[in-house]
């Protein structure tokens, strides 16, 4: 745990428990989102749509958790009047659960496209090309959740840097897909589907960056949104 | 300065201002042998509200009472250092303390109206400070002061009734009206809402906000939410030391000192 921010140690132990509860729910949401991406990854690797059958159910669970966390944060704002690090924890958490919920939506969207594509051989092949991007996004998500759990700003900056690699990878995927579609107009429909799926994966990376920005705000009290990454690093070094 | 006061500690944040209304330098307060305030340096901005917060016994009320020499009433209390109101050295032995307290008024925790009529409570200060004895002028002054405190409409029909018949919140607003009737430059408030219900508290807080256009206000409060609501700057005291001073928004969202953070998040009290 970073020494700049402390979740426990309140005179009110009940307040400590409430904050712990919220954090553990966020991490549970994170683990469900990771499972969604696992399923997407397995389906792409094995070329089987059976792996993704219950992605929708996971998304329902994620949505429920988002609402629970929001409600608990509202209660804490109303009843505890949190200040300083506690206030930043609540603000960062309500924002992060929104990003996690959207990651869940994007994962569900990709899963549905894969399910549809697995019925057709040509599409299956085109989708398989998304496997490396999926793996990298999954890794990024895992590191983001660790960053939130441990409240490490340096790790947050690393994730933000890695997202830039994902953006580049996404651009390469798009270029490849354009070539693929140019070769044969019959490929256009599949190509566009894969492009939308790649776009969703790239968006997941962006949501991870948002969560990392929230972690930096939580720990340092600095709003680093819309800042250049090198500036962020400099600000944190100060 | 005592040996203890030489312990190194640095107030975090921005205790000093350009062109302050009051400035306090290297101030120590002793009750007999016991030191209550340690080497405080702080500026109080003109027409600003500054809140003093901190756990019980941290010295915030002691500090507040230094600002108009209310501590003079305690025999064993000794104040060292420099405390200035504009160019006036507050602790200069030659100054008239009564005049000082007309310039730096005070409102206390418990509403303490005089056992006189509502009218007389407000007119009293003006009379003893010789501001006016003219009935018409006094009437105007009483009305103006009561209006500024939002009390005129509530009491105009019963100005001759005893002030003690008013509700707690009305009594406290009357005390504020009494304080501002002598046209002070600074108003010190020592937990002015701690004996009031939430509605009366909200009324007094709104009044503080309005008065800050014309007066400099220093408020000691146990309610951190009140400090957050009413003040532009917040000073955190701990064991007689001024730990942190900064804009209220900064103190409550991102305090710089660990002790401030622990206090406002309910980890020490």
Image (tube, grey):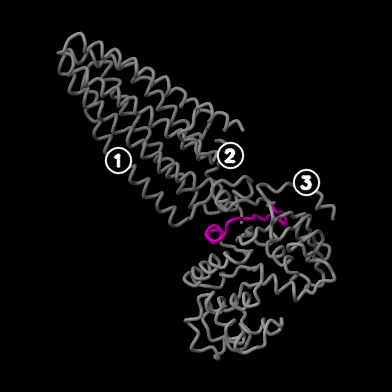
Q: Which residue is drawn at 59% across and 66% down?
A: B214
For label 2, the SS is: loop
- Cα separation between marks 3 and 1: 53 Å
Mark 1, residue position = A63
Q: Residue B8 carries which label?
A: 3
| Mark 2–mark 3 CB contact (< 8 Å) | no
Estimate the x, y position of residue B60 in percent, counting from the top left: 68, 61
Residue that carries the numbered disc 2 in the rendered image: A4
Quarter occupied by residue A99: top left
Quadrant in the picture for residue B177 = bottom right
Magenta stretch in the rendered image? B224-242
* Labelled pair 3, 1 in contact (Cβ < 8 Å): no
- In the rendered image, which quarter contains the N terminus of chain A? top right
Q: Nearer the viewer, mark 2 or mark 3?
A: 3
Q: Are callouts 2 and 3 both on one chain?
A: no
Where residue B216 sits in the image (x, y, percent)? 63, 64
Q: Residue, x 73% and y 69% (percent of image)?
A: B68
Q: Could you tell me residue B33's position as x and y percent?
A: 83, 62
Does A97 appear in magenta? no
Which chain does the numbered disc 3 sit on? B
Residue found at the very far top of the displayed protein: A183
**Left or right: where A194 falls relative to B101:** left
**Residue sitting nearer the eye, A53 or B90:** B90
The reply to whether the magenta stretch includes residue B235 is: yes
Against B197, residue B136 (above or below) is: below
């Amino acid at each position: 745990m970073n020494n700049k921010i402390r979740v426990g140690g309140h005179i009110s132990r009940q307040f400590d428990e409430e904050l712990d509860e919220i954090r553990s729910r966020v991490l549970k949401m994170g683990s469900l989102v990771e499972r969604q991406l696992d399923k997407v990854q397995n389906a792409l690797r094995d070329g089987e749509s059976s792996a993704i059958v219950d992605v929708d159910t996971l998304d329902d669970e994620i949505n429920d958790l988002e609402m629970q966390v929001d409600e608990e944060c509202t209660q804490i704002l109303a009843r505890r009047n949190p200040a300083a690090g506690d206030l930043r924890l609540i603000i960062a958490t309500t924002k992060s659960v929104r990003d996690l919920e959207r990651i869940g939506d994007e994962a569900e969207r990709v899963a549905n496209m894969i399910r549809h594509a697995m019925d057709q051989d040509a599409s299956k092949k085109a989708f398989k090309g998304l496997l490396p991007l999926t793996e990298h996004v999954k890794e990024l998500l895992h590191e983001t959740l660790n960053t939130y759990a441990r409240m490490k700003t340096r790790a947050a900056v690393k994730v933000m840097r890695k997202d830039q690699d994902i953006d580049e990878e996404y651009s390469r995927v798009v270029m490849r897909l354009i070539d693929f579609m140019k070769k044969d107009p019959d490929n256009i429909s599949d190509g566009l589907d894969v492009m939308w799926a790649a776009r969703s994966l790239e968006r997941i990376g962006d949501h991870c960056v948002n969560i990392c920005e929230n972690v930096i705000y939580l720990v340092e009290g600095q709003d680093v949104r819309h800042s250049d990454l090198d500036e962020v690093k400099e600000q944190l070094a100060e | 300065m005592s040996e203890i006061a030489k312990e190194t500690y640095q107030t975090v944040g921005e205790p000093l201002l350009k062109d302050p209304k009051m400035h306090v330098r290297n101030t120590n307060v002793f009750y007999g042998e016991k030191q209550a305030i340690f080497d405080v340096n702080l500026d109080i901005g003109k027409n600003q509200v500054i809140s003093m917060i901190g756990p019980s016994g941290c010295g915030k009320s002691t500090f507040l009472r230094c600002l108009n020499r209310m501590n003079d009433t305690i025999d064993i209390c000794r104040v060292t250092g420099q405390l200035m109101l504009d160019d006036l050295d507050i602790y200069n032995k030659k100054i008239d303390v009564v005049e000082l307290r007309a310039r730096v008024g005070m409102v206390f925790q418990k509403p303490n109206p005089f056992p006189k009529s509502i009218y007389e409570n407000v007119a009293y200060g003006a009379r003893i400070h010789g501001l006016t004895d003219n009935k018409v002028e006094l009437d105007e002054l009483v009305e103006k002061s009561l209006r500024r405190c939002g009390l005129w409409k509530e009491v105009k029909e019963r100005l001759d009734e005893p002030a003690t018949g008013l509700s707690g919140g009305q009594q406290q607003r009357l005390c504020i009206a009494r304080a501002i009737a002598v046209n002070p430059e600074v108003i010190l408030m020592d937990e002015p809402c701690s004996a009031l219900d939430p509605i009366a508290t909200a009324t007094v807080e709104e009044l503080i906000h309005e008065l800050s256009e014309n007066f400099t206000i220093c408020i000691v409060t146990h309610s951190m939410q009140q400090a957050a609501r009413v003040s532009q700057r917040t000073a955190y005291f701990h064991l007689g030391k001024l730990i942190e001073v900064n804009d209220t928004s900064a103190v409550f969202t991102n305090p710089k000192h660990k002790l401030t953070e622990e206090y406002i998040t309910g980890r020490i009290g």
